[in-house]
Amino acid sequence: MGLSVKGYGIHGTNAPGSIGHNVSHGCIRMRNRDVEELFELMAVGDSVELYGERSEETERLFGPTVVAAHSEQRASGAAQ
């Protein structure tokens, strides 16, 4: 799904461990089944708000942040 800024969008990924990490030039990656569900809920012209970090409201809506095992491995590998 394209956003109003050229080159940015929301899409699924075949590498779910990459979700939530800065590994692209701005696209938002989601699990394929989640982006398919989101697509069904959206229409062309719907407004999307992007937040740089979780607020109390997003925490209440989506639950606590989950740290992926992928990022923990990368962090522990960098410390050695």
Image: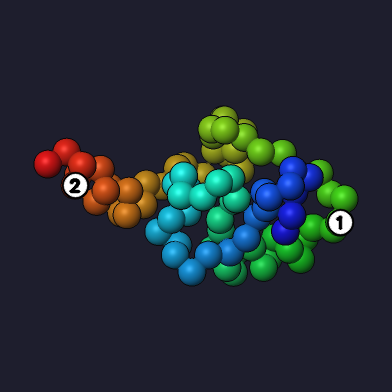
User: Which of 61 and 65 lies nearest the eye of the viewer?
Assistant: 65
* Numbered mark located on residue 67 in the image: none
Helix, strand or loop at label 2? It is helix
Which residue corresponds to the image point at 56% horizontal and 56% vertical from the top-left?
Answer: 29
Of labels 2 and 1, earlier in sequence is 1
Helix, strand or loop at label 1? It is loop
- The quadrant of the rendering that contains the C terminus is top left
62 relative position to 78: left or right: right
Residue 50 image position (x, y, % from top left)? 66, 38
- The quadrant of the rendering that contains the N terminus is bottom right
Q: Is residue 62 visible?
A: no
76 relative position to 36: left or right: left
Residue 49 image position (x, y, % from top left)? 72, 39
Which residue corresponds to the image point at 58% horizontal and 64% vertical from the top-left?
Answer: 12
Establish if 67 lies above or below 59. Answer: below
Which residue corresponds to the image point at 74% horizontal and 43% vertical from the top-left?
Answer: 5
How packed is label 1: few (under 14 Cα within 10 Å), some, or many (20 or more)?
few
Q: Is residue 57 visible?
A: yes
Which residue corresponds to the image point at 25% horizontal and 43% vertical from the top-left?
Answer: 75
Name the residue that disc number 1 marks.
Answer: 44
User: Which of 5 and 68 lies nearest the eye of the viewer?
Assistant: 5
How packed is label 2: few (under 14 Cα within 10 Å), some, or many (20 or more)?
few
Residue 9 image position (x, y, % from top left)? 67, 53
Q: Amino acid at mark 1?
A: Val
Q: Residue furthest top?
A: 56
Q: Amino acid at mark 2?
A: Gly
Name the residue that disc number 2 marks.
Answer: 77
65 relative position to 73: left or right: right
